[in-house]
Image: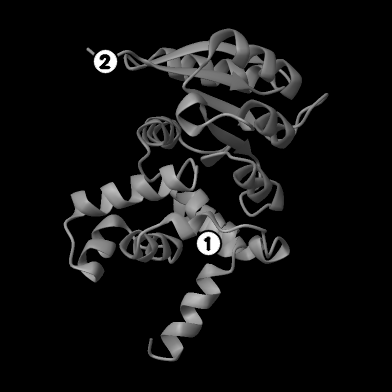
Amino acid sequence: MADPIRVAIVDDQPLFASGMRMLIEAQPDLECVGTASDGRESVTLFERVRPDIVLMDLRMPVLNGIEATKLILNGRKPEDSPRVIVLTTIQRDEAVYSALRAGASAFLTKDATPADVLATIRGTHRGQPTATEVAALGLVREFSAAHPGRPGSLHERLSPRECEVMLAVADGCTNSQIAARAQLSEATVKTHVRSVLSKLNLRSRVHIVIYAYEYGLVAGQKQSARRGL
């Protein structure tokens, strides 16, 4: 049997944190390895227990979830860091986008069903799409215009096929849709997605979308399509 997914919970509401802990500990494949009540405590907790997943509240005293996410993830390779799932009361919130931009892999609203919470934890751990991925892509499209023109161009490392797959992901396509569009198998598409994530040092498909929008690659793709290229 595989080792359980190790989850840390960071939230300043004791009742909510306790409920989440009970939900996680009732699952045979999940383990709650600790809780923290503010962002500063979450950094200390991460260093002590090294969880696979951090459920991170956005709005907390001492240090908010965005800054805590940056402290936990910045300077660490994706394979050496946890996957952060941010917790929010408002879905269409620029703070959620800021957390995704800081490295969070997914988000959950606090009124999510237990089934959605568990599916998001498991899916995020496996690098699979989550229930809120479509909403996350919408947030990226809505707010990325405020952060245009990053310097540098890591995407020059990508092969033409990897660039094609990256732009298709940025366009919101699933692996099966990309496979049909590019006449590839889904297994090959997954390999290309993993390669894009590795070469660009990104953590998830959502971060591919953020990267593409902030470098203006999606706009360029649309202009090329209109020219018939």
Amino acid type at circle 1 is Ala
From this viewpoint, is residue 212 visible? yes
From this viewpoint, is residue 131 visible? no
| Quadrant containing the C terminus in the rendered view | bottom left
Return the residue nearer the eye: 31 or 126: 126
Report the residue at 70% width, 37% height from top.
Answer: 66
Tell me if 41 is positioned left or right of 91 in this view. Answer: right
Report the residue at 53% width, 61% height from top.
Answer: 212
Residue placed under numbered mark 2 in the picture: 2
Q: What x and y, as percent, mark residue 41?
A: 72, 15
Q: Residues within 10 Å of mark 1 (few under 14, many from 20)?
A: many
Report the residue at 64% width, 39% height from top.
Answer: 88
Pointer 1 or 2: first along the chain:
2
Tell me if 210 is positioned left or right of 221 in this view. Answer: right
Helix, strand or loop at label 2? It is loop
Helix, strand or loop at label 1? It is helix
